[in-house]
Amino acid sequence: MPRRRWLSLTLPKTSEWPRWVIGLWLVILIGSAVAVVCSGVAAGLRNQRPAIALQFAPGDARALSRMADTSLLVEDGQLRDPSEPRRYARAALARDATLPASWRVLGLTAPDGSALSVELLETAERLSRRDAPTQLALIEFAVGRGDILGALGHYDILLRISSAYDAVLFPVLVGASTEPQIRQVLGQQLLRAPMWRRRFLAYMVNAATPYPVQADLFSAIAKGGKAFPDSDIVASQATNSALGGNYVIARHLYGLVAPGEVTQRLRNGGFDKDGGVPPFDWQYDSDGALTVAVASFGPGRRLEIISERGDGARAARQLLFLTPGRYRLAAQVGAIEGEPAGRPYMTMTCADAGTPLLTVDTQPKARRVAGMVSVPNGCAVQWLELGMRQDPNGARAAAWVDGVAIDRVGD
């Protein structure tokens, strides 16, 4: 059976084409090449040099949109005649209705605060929530309406877009948070754990934000009922507050991160726990006069104090919140094996006024020491200090302290 041949179309040789056909093909090819080149040039220039891009591609929608954006402002940052930006924006949208910048330009050039202006800006936002100028404009409109929650919603979007906006927006948020109503709404926003919360809290504590403002925002976050997030930032600020003499705020912040510890009369009296939040837990001093370390001994640990030249100084301290009444302060002390015996001491003072309440000095070979102390009214916060007395001969001395305890014995 013979093989079936498929029909084929044979074109004439180009040498047989009429000249007008060849000319037409050349025009089409050259025109296509020019269009491709112009389109490529326009694409490369539309963002930085939109006016030049439009010379190559007058109908490029993105270049028109960019022209609308750049023609909206003059050098001094003031709005110019809105007719030109609007003309570019409409021309861009006629070619591509999905360009958020063009909708934004129409919104910004509409009558200030009008429903049309807001509607156009919201259209731009629906097309792209990542358009930062749109979010900034919507923040301004929300603030003008007194819509705090709406404004913070747009802040949230901007801060999620990029941490580059932190430097612009965080100072505004911190400043606004001094208003109780704004602080309440901001606290609710922070409770929802936005991705920028930790960055904001770190900025807030380093920006000299008033302590009551910080305490309110931290408390709002703590209402979540779970383990306190970003507790290291709160603990650091609790320490800073205490060392700065803001004891009421300091105790409040410490209570957020260690609610079970803040009510105790003394914390870690046996030096068995690591970590903690100084000075609510032990704050150790090693300023050159003394070498201070927590060392293992037997089944537990103890505080060891060494004075190389017999200098006297503080070794450790802790901030207490004892209520008015009578207490017994006790501890075990002794000489470190193989070392010259030193003389440790304990003192308690009112933190606010610096009024001495108790001093307990020990002898080199004493073991259990104690003293009675009365905490008066008006002394809500106390400092407990452990240290080493100066050696009368200026000789090396060492001692250990353990089992520090405070018991209430009366009113």
Image (cartoon, rainbow, N blue to C red):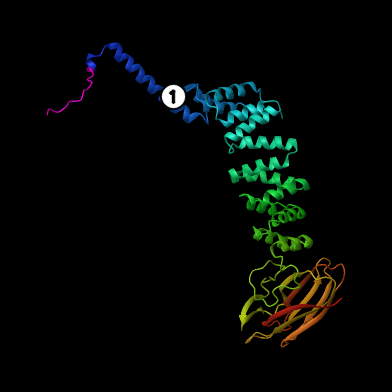
Outermost residue toward the left in this view: 1
Outermost residue toward the front in this view: 1
Q: Is residue 77 visible?
A: no
Q: Position of residue 78 (x, y in %)?
A: 68, 28
Residue at 78 percent of width and 76 percent of height = 347
Quadrant location of the N terminus? top left
Say above or below: 66 vs 267. Answer: above
The answer to whether residue 323 is left or right of residue 399 is: right
Could you tell me the amino acid type at mark 1? Cys
The count of marks equals: 1
Kind of element beneath mark 1: helix
Q: Is residue 230 magenta?
A: no
Residue at 66 percent of width and 86 percent of height = 340
Label 1, residues with CA under 10 Å away: few <14, some 14-19, many ≥20: some
Say above or below: 302 vs 221. Answer: below
Quadrant location of the C terminus? bottom right
| Chain part drawn in magenta | 1-13
Magenta stretch prevailing secondary structure: loop
The answer to whether residue 266 is left or right of residue 103 is: right
Question: Which residue is nearer to you in this view: 206 or 255?
Answer: 255
Q: Is residue 400 visible?
A: yes
Q: Is residue 8 magenta?
A: yes
Question: Which residue is nearer to you in this view: 7 or 110?
Answer: 7
Residue at 70 percent of width and 29 percent of height = 115
What residue is disc 1 on? 38
Question: Which residue is nearer to you in this view: 4 or 394?
Answer: 4
Quadrant of the image occupied by residue 241: bottom right
Q: Position of residue 358 (x, y in %)?
A: 82, 77
Quadrant of the image occupied by residue 32: top left
Say above or below: 100 vs 272. Answer: above
